[in-house]
Amino acid sequence: MAQEPTTRPADDGDDRGGQQARDEQPVLLVEDVAGVRVLTLNRPDAYNSLTYQLKEDLLAALRDTAADEQVRAVVLTGTGRSFCAGQDLREHVELLRTGDPAPLRTVDEHYNPLVRVVTGMPKPVIAAVNGTAAGAGAALAYACDLRVAAESAKFVMAFAGVGLTADTGASWTLPRLVGYGRAMEMMMLGAPVTAAEALRVGLVNRVVADAELSDAALALATRLAAGPTTAYAKIKEAMLAASTASLEQALAVEARTQVEAGATADHREAVEAFVAKRKPEFVGH
């Protein structure tokens, strides 16, 4: 690639629940390469389950990514054998035992904001799903724009198994991906859905060999990062609005977003390139 990747830990968030020692591995890795930001959940020994610290760091990193105009596509993935096992139940139990209110506030303080920033991200977000995606971890993948899964990946709606209902937007995203009946089955029974089945029912966009996942996701993100970023943002906006809109409302959103996309340098470049019979060079705005 033309640009060398840069990797850094995410900025430290709130130190609640015990501050990480400075010599420990960061729970979130942030890597930039060729206009793509790769956010990697980095708790492999705990299947990348979501602690308070990881949720804080991920939310801060996503907000920073949304505001960074140099980043034009995003990959969300995990280290080790799991994409994300959802809420860290060990931490959850300990906080409940001590009477800490954090577990009861985490949906409002973390999971809902995470979904909002991913779906509202003005650039494409790709989930590269390695291994198990369970509970809130699976729901984070559903909130992304595209999902690339390793052959060993599986999706588990684990909420009912621990006496909980859906969160992290799963009640909204999952039925829109696979239909109401299949979503209800996944929610209530909690049976794992393999990568092959996920591809068949439209839960993921692509399935690749485990060893090829990172390269495949990065190649897709790099392709998108070289594209018309504002147009992608407007596509996301229109699609999200249309999910709950009437036809007339959807037409109104399309009319507005098309005007906004049509005013970009990328649109002018694309039509000039078409006339000149050359490949357009998009700048993202």
Image (cartoon, rainbow, N blue to C red):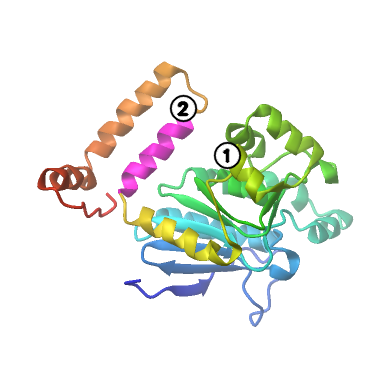
Circle 2 sits in a helix, a strand or a loop, which is it? helix
Magenta region, residue range: 228-241
Determine which of the numbered discs, if any, sits on residue 242 in the image: 2
Residue 25 percent across, percent down from the top left: 64, 76
Residue 129 percent across, percent down from the top left: 60, 56
**Circle 1 or circle 2, nearest the eye:** 1
State yes or no: residue 198 in magenta.
no
- Can see residue 2? yes
Residue 139 percent across, percent down from the top left: 64, 45
- Direction from residue 259 to residue 191 in the image, left or right: right
Circle 1 sits in a helix, a strand or a loop, which is it? loop
Q: Which residue is mark 1?
A: 202
Classify 10 Å Cα crowding around label 1: few (below 14), some (14-19), many (20 and above). some
On the image, which quarter does residue 271 sit in?
top left
Q: Nearer the viewer, residue 211 or 168?
A: 211
Task: Identify the residue at image location x=35%, y=22%.
Answer: 252
Residue 13 percent across, percent down from the top left: 60, 64
Task: Identify the residue at image location x=38%, y=43%.
Answer: 233
